Amino acid sequence: MARTLLGALLNKTSSVAAQTPVPFASRSASYGGVFGSNRTAEGQMRAMSAVGTLFAIVDRTSNATALVDWKLYRKTASGRKEDRVEVTSHAALDLWLKPNKFMPRQEFVETFQQHFDLTGEAWWVISRHQAANVPLELWPVRPDRMTPVPSRENFLAGYLYTSPDGEQIPLALDEVIQLRRPNPLDPYRGLSPVLSILPDLDTSRYASEWSRAFFVNSAQPGGIIEVPSALSDDQFDELRDRWNEQHRGVGNAHRVAILEHGKWVDRTISQRDMQFVELRGATADRIREAYGISKTAIGDFEDINRASALAAKSWFAEQQTVPRLERIKAALNFELLPMYGPTAAGLEFDYEPPTPPDPEIEAQQLTARANAAAALVTAGFEAAGTLSAVGLPDIAYVGKPAAPAPDTSLSDWQNSLAGLLGGDIDAAQRWVAVEHDDEHTCGPCREVAGRTYKNRAEAYEDYPDGGGYVGCIGAKYGNECRGHVEKRGRKGGEGE
């Protein structure tokens, strides 16, 4: 069935295109003349080429959507995105990368996205392999040529495709995928933003045509030539031709008019009176409002700096591109992949994030995650699984680093100096034993008097708490030890 449609797309469309093109004015008249009175899907699509603001919006959104890369993944039991495994070889992936032999993925996406942004609908027609009955090609089809066929029992029985020559081709449910913006009045069709701005589109087009006519018609809106009596046909034609020859066109603007038997009645309305600049600006605002797009998104960079430009780019990706990608993602995962049967079980398409990275935010997030990981490990959680829990990549855990070795550089220097000076480095020592030398001093205390120690620990081994020599024997005779250790300066003076 899809092969029959493919023939209609390629052969019948080609034969129609080979015919003599119809002038735009004739085409406009054939479908209603003006946008405001033509609410058909064809009229909505034609509006893109008639109004510059609408063209810029649709071109920007469809192009941004088409430039995003896609990948195919195999889901895991955890259900987390970071645990998925990328699949690089599958028939569904090959089809999505090249939907048909005439279109790469980028052109295919941009084509149907234009349809969607203009009419609220996008249609994919599927051509199947006759032997394997799996999708072989995808084709974007104009929404105005597709008609859903409702069903009392099953909601939808199928679709009808109307070819350019009027032939209607029935299509089954598994031969068509429809993307649509839900229409509150019609569950089978989409809703177009263009319908809400048809009068504004008319206003914009008429303003452009009026401005063009202003310059074509002698740069004046027009006037009346009054004659005192009726003119014959020949006289009328001669007056008209002579006037157009001498005064029509921008090059003849403001030339002096000489009338032999008539009077010129000026009915000029100036551009300033009509305020066409303000009118066209207001119309452009209405069009942007319908699509929810700012001036910056379509190239108006007044009063913008690097920070605001980055913010505008991020906003466009989040609010415009991502919703369109999510709609495509749903169609791929819930409609296209199931057509491949068991070979597609557990697979899903996903797109690369279109939001540009913010270096400052990324640095803040990395710091916050590292601090969270450190806090969890300190609290006793297993270090090996903490990184993935806070969103950091796994790193091999080798345990806590060993405590740093004590700094012995000063002692090594003192020992070296002692060797050079023959051991006489009393002035370099920090602690000295101090004893009273009188008849009450015992022998051990007299011997230890003046001994130097390298540090406080050594001194307190002989003098616990800094006083009373451990070897003193005076206590046997009722005399408490009066010795102690003192901290001395580097030059032998008392320390602070």
Image (spheres, rainbow, N blue to C red):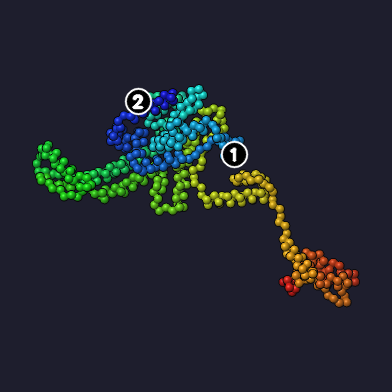
Residue lying at the far top of the rendered structure:
131
Residue type at mark 2 is Gly
Mark 1 lies on a secondary structure that is helix
- Label 1, on which residue? 83
Q: Residue at x 83, y 69 (%)?
A: 468
Residue lying at the far left of the rendered structure:
229
Q: Which of the image's four quarters has the C terminus?
A: bottom right
User: Does residue 149 appear to the left or right of 18 in the view shown?
Assistant: right
Mark 2 lies on a secondary structure that is loop
Cα separation between marks 1 and 2 = 51 Å
Q: Which of the image's four quarters has the N terminus?
A: top left
Q: Quadrant of residue 244?
A: top left
Q: Camera-side residue: 454 or 177?
A: 454
Q: Earlier in the sequence, mark 1 or mark 2?
A: 1
Q: Residue at x 41, y 31 (%)?
A: 141
Q: Is residue 269 above or below residue 35?
A: below
User: Does residue 29 appear to the left or right of 423 in the view shown?
Assistant: left
Residue type at mark 1 is Asp
Residue 59 pos. (x, y %): 40, 41
Residue 184 pos. (x, y %): 42, 35
Q: Residue at x 86, y 67 (%)?
A: 471
Q: Quadrant of residue 46?
A: top left
Residue 474 pos. (x, y %): 88, 71
Residue 408 pos. (x, y %): 73, 61
- Label 2, on which residue? 166
User: Does residue 423 appear to the left or right of 81 in the view shown?
Assistant: right
Q: Residues within 10 Å of mark 1 (few under 14, many from 20)?
A: few
Q: Specify whether residue 157 is in view.
A: no
Q: Which mark is residue 195?
A: none
Q: Residues within 10 Å of mark 2 (few under 14, many from 20)?
A: few
Task: Give the number of callouts.
Answer: 2
